[in-house]
Amino acid sequence: MADLATPGYLGAFKVAMAGAAAVRVGLGLIENIVPKLRRVPLDGRDSKGRRVSVPVLKVEDGPNKDLQSWVCLKVTVDKLGVIDAKAEIPVDVVHLNDLTGKFANGFSVDQDGVGYLPIALLLWRDQRRLFKVVQNVYFNQRHSFAPPEKDGGKGWHVFSPVA
């Protein structure tokens, strides 16, 4: 019996291990905006169109007690809930080891104009070494904002795939 190799995943926001405590994040778009990782666009082009190296995302803060963490898109919106493409970093790639209060029922709970989309689950061997990446997002994304239904409530960031 042959063990045939399966084709690698080539979709948006591909997350791959880059050592024991770092990952690489592939290009993807959210509302046609290229996210940044440590201030470098994921497409590897600076503001003048020159090629630059996209850094790895260091995940040295490690996992939670269940040996899990997440690579997320962090979206910052204006008062109307729209991503401001002119902001310094409208969409950032971040590592979180706790989604409590940030993500519920498939939606991102607004955190004073900030929303999070988990693009990959990271499984850890122990507190210092990654074991596996489980991809959560496979397509470019659309973002919309649902404002709070009552004063003092929380709004929701809603993400959906775009073909």
Image (cartoon, grey):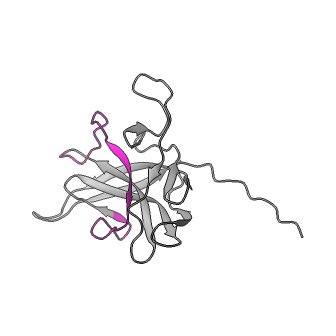
Between 149 and 35, the one lying in front of the other is: 35
Vertical relation: 122 (above or below) 11: below
Residue 67, position as x, y percentages in the image: 45, 74
Indicate yes or no whether the magenta region holds residue 122. no
What residue sits 32% from the left and 49% below the top?
75
**The N terminus lies in which quarter of the figure?**
bottom right
Is 133 on the left or on the right of 117, as rendered?
right
Indicate yes or no whether the magenta region holds residue 84. yes
Residue 115, position as x, y percentages in the image: 30, 56
Q: Is residue 33 visible?
A: no
Q: Residue furthest right?
A: 1
Q: Residue furthest left?
A: 151
Residue 57, position as x, y percentages in the image: 45, 50
What residue sits 52% from the left and 49% below the top?
24
Residues in magenta? 79-107
Q: Residue furthest bottom?
A: 66
Quadrant for residue 103, please give it.
bottom left
Q: What secondary structure predominates along the stretch shown in magenta? A: loop
Between 18 and 101, the one lying in front of the other is: 18
Residue 140, position as x, y percentages in the image: 48, 47
What residue sits 41% from the left and 22% below the top?
48
Vertical relation: 154 (above or below) 16: below
Total marks placed: 0
What residue sits 47% from the left and 30% below the top?
45
Q: Is residue 63 visible?
A: yes
